[in-house]
Amino acid sequence: MAELNSTVAQVTERIAQRSAKRRRRYLDLIDAYDPTKPARVKLAEANQAHTSAGCAVQDKIQLLGGKWPSIGIVTAYNDMLSAHAPYERFPDVIRKAAREAGAVAQVAGGVPAMCDGVTQGFEGMELSLFSRDAIALSTAVSLSHATFDAALLLGICDKIVPGLLIGALRFPWLPAILVPSGPMPSGLPNKEKAARRQLFAEGKIGREDLLKAEAESYHAPGTCTFYGTANSNQMMMEMMGLHMPSAAFVPPNTPLRDALTVAATKRAAAITGLGKDYRPIGRVVDEKAIVNAMIGLMATGGSTNHFIHLPAIALAAGIEINWDDFAELSRVTPLLARIYPNGSADVNHFHDAGGMALLVRELLDAGLLHGDIVTVGGDGLAAYTQEPFLAGEALSWRDALATSGDEGVLRGASKPFANDGGLRLMSGGLGRACVKVSAVADDKRVVEAPALVFDSQAEVQAAFKRGDLDRDCVLVVRGQGPRANGMPELHKLMPLIGALQDRGFKIALVTDGRLSGASGKVLSAIHVTPEAAEGGPIAKVRDGDLIRVDGEAGVLEVLTPADWRERAPSQLDLAGHARGVGRELFALFRQNACSAERGGSAFPDYDPL
């Protein structure tokens, strides 16, 4: 392992200094907790009786009279989401494995798991970002019974993993392991699916043909195979040492997947304070682990959603990061993966080419990761350079492939696809934003054109149908931030904007809303902060203003109109976003949301100074 890159070291130290007081108050929660006694014995007798009343006899005996550790399962199971459907059978697998390890496992609670793929372009998407906060709250409720010595967190997708992690981090004395379910088999290639969507947007195919293509792409239990937020989540959990090594992309409902779930259960039993290898989550997730996650995001060109989720996760652990940290790390991190939308391969191809084990080894050998972090798998990240396999029925690990199995998908650090990361910070007179340049062709990364301003994606869709967008332009879609309407993803815009780009127009998108890791080939400055609802500069833009979106230089600028300083921000009409589809219940979330750069969360500071 090479000496740590100086920029990585400096950014980590700066984060540690910035966070020192807040992090100390957070760690005080661990120091005040005695993990050497089963958590349940701290409860009164009636409370203990309640914990065991619904258990199998052998578990009840141990809960009432024994000293076995108790593992709480927090599950995002539902059978509407392909990624979470496999979790239906996990509790039985986990309970059996726990008994074999001398532990008891119980489902502590469930958390909601909504799918952005279902709500895209509809009102339900306005609950999406805040579903992360609801999941964190549900996780906290699940663990609030204070009867558990460790936790297993079952979740995969967009807001689910960040929400589970935020909730668990507020119980920093509990060891916790994230347990993935794995990706679905490869179906219709993601690039072909995107092409069909664009044809539909242009009116060249009908709904029946589009539905057929979508069903051929999303066709089986497991995570969607493109490299969006869900699969970026799995990558980050490995980089932070919160998975069993190389568990991220093993397919669901296979013997190897079951073996990894069993191993996670037995490991959870082994790292409680009742044994000799106590690993509370609050010490696993530290400044170094957060930096590792950011490096992984850059090296793989992952989801832009994590410019929001990672600050929220870090803050839950008493750590403060900002987009400048992302930007500095991006400049020294080579792009080592090409997974759709910044390539044609999917995550199954990435896994087969060497996957997480090879990626971690290459980054460690290049001095770009903190190898000395505490992980649930052991001391140091070296264990995560190995991949699991079955020797008969026994789970074993072996070293990663010596070289990539497909250099069109995954490369070594000495021969990267690009010398810097796939995500960038943008700043200028319109505020701060991020862009996923790894998916954008080199000749499409700078656009300077007149603004066309919209207050909803429905307005953009209507203008496209009228032919009003057939020109060089920068589409400014405002009023889409956390405080305005909950910050929905605007992914429905990608097919039609892609069609305009293919017609030869110079086009870019600027918005205070979100796009995911599947944002695609159009230059998009997203998560603009301050948002329009807070009177940010994006609210001052008018049709015809000349906008420069420079993904290479990281510039987001209005080429100042003469009256710019005197202009008042436009007043947004948000009445249509207040009622229906449960949006009334999330009014407090919108009113209290912090900026996108701070995580877009409705939670106040966890540990005010």
Image (cartoon, rainbow, N blue to C red):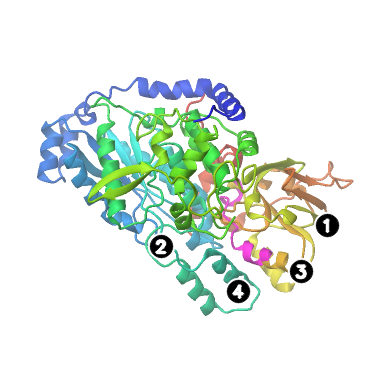
Farthest residue to the right: give it: 562
Q: Which element carries disc 2, helix, strand or loop?
A: loop
C-beta proximity under 8 Å, tags 2 and 1: no
Mark 2 vs 1, N-terminal side: 2
Could you tell me which residue is drawn at 59 percent across and 63 percent down?
492
Label number found at residue 468: 3
Q: Earlier in the sequence, mark 2 or mark 4?
A: 2
Instruction: Give the crowd class for mark 3: few <14, some 14-19, many >=20 residues within 10 Å.
Output: few
Structural distance between the alpha carbons of marks 3 and 4: 18 Å
Q: Which amino acid is tagged 2? A: Pro
Task: Say if the magenta span includes residue 457.
Answer: no
Residue designated by label 2? 185
Please name the residue shown 41% across and 62% down the image: 185
Q: Is residue 205 visible?
A: yes
Q: Upstream in the sequence, badge 3 or badge 1?
A: 3
Secondary structure state at the residue bearing disc 1: loop
**Dots 3 and 4: beta carbons under 8 Å?**
no
The amino acid beneath tag 4 is Phe
Q: Secondary structure at mark 4?
A: helix
Find residue 321 and report its horizontal and vertical position in percent.
57, 32
Specify which label sits upstream in the sequence, 1 or 4.
Answer: 4
Q: Residues within 10 Å of mark 2 (few under 14, many from 20)?
A: many
Front one among 310 and 565: 310
Instruction: Give the residue pinned by disc 4.
Output: 200
Viewer-nearest of discs 2 and 4: 2
Pair 3/4: label in front: 4
**Magenta part of the chain:** 483-498
The image position of residue 274, as x and y in percent, is 23, 27
Find the distance from the CA under tag 3 to the CA under tag 1: 13 Å
Instruction: Please state the total of marks drawn on the protein image.
Output: 4
* Residue indicated by mark 1: 544
Q: Is residue 332 left or right of residue 364?
A: right
